[in-house]
Image: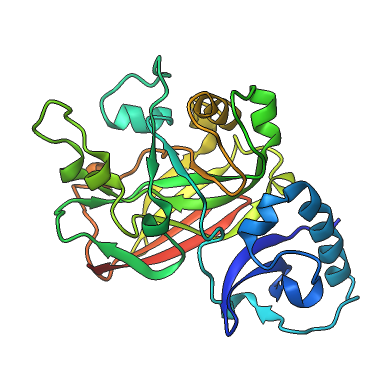
Amino acid sequence: MSSFTLATLRSSQGAQAAIGVKDYYYLIHEFQPDLPSTVRMLLDQWETSLPMLEALANHIALGKVGVGSRLDLNMADFETPVMFPDKLMAVGANYSGHLKEMGLDPKKWASMPFFLRPPKTTLVGPGETVQIPKSTKQFDWELELVVIVGKHLRHASKEEAAAAVAGYSIGLDLSCRDLIQVDNDLKVDLVRGKAQDTMAPCGPYMVPAKFVPNPYNLHLQLWVNGEKMMDASSAEMLYHIDEQLSIISEYLTIEPGDILFTGSPSGSAGVHGNRWLKPGDRIHAEIEAIGSLDVIMKQA
């Protein structure tokens, strides 16, 4: 079986689903018109789409399809992979190293913290896509393994949750550190602190779950302007992905196409001399078996 990735590419016909095989991307509707033309629609019928995509990838790898609108990987114009999920979920305090970095015990909390972000305004793809909010002086980075869901989940067991994972991508949970903690009775403001426009870059593509057999031993790395800031392993996860989805499904209906940010390891700006992000800064993030994501900061 040929491995492949899924992406959303900008084209003359608008945003289109594309399949990546080796070093090229192919607009799916040109080669398999029976398949939907967006990644979101592919995920809506993932059990049907996946075997058809596998067959298409095999045909491409064997040279049994025409070149068509084949694009070199370096020439592809990526959007975020799923435009747009109904829900963008995020789990916090999920890496032992990150908890140590914050001066907390590196153990599971009794109640797993999670929150929602508005996907149509916070979710962006690679490139010069991130706007630093005018309201912050402490714009920070976090690198996260992203889960993309392919089934409905409600009151799901861990086994059902694991089976619902369609694929993985790379996410950046960008944060306004000076806006998260506030001087009121609630003490925390996650909207101003983590859910402003463009603060959830994700991409550049989705790797189907079957090509990532063990998501709990992946190397995560992040650089800012070429300087390494994060270097960790997903083995540090306290709540595994199946447990995260199972817990969230007790409170929300999770739907195909929904996205889950699974937590960040240590290495954010606070441990690098409060080296906050500024306009023109470039983030390069890598997750083993997934790929790399590059974004550039600009002022809002």
Residue 155, placed above or below residue 118: above
Residue 19, quarter of picture: bottom right
Q: Residue at x 16, y 61 (%)?
A: 134
Q: Residue at x 73, y 51 (%)?
A: 45
Residue 263, quarter of picture: top left
Q: Give residue 22's position: percent from left, percent from top.
A: 73, 68
User: Would you say residue 2 is visible in this rendering?
Assistant: no
Q: Give residue 257's position: percent from left, percent from top.
A: 59, 49
Residue located farthest toward the top when viewing the structure as drawn: 110
Horizontally, residue 118 falls left or right of residue 168, namely left
Q: Residue at x 46, y 51 (%)?
A: 171
Residue 151, placed above or below residue 34: above
User: Would you say residue 28 is visible in this rendering?
Assistant: yes
Q: Give residue 254's position: percent from left, percent from top.
A: 56, 37
Q: Residue at x 62, y 32 (%)?
A: 153
All told, the count of numbered labels is 0
Horizontally, residue 100 falls left or right of residue 119, namely left
Q: Nearer the viewer, residue 283 or 93?
A: 93
- The coloring applied to the image is rainbow
Quadrant occupied by the N terminus: bottom right
Residue located farthest toward the left when viewing the structure as drawn: 183
Residue 256, placed above or below residue 228: above
Q: Give residue 232's position: percent from left, percent from top.
A: 46, 40
Quadrant occupied by the C terminus: bottom left
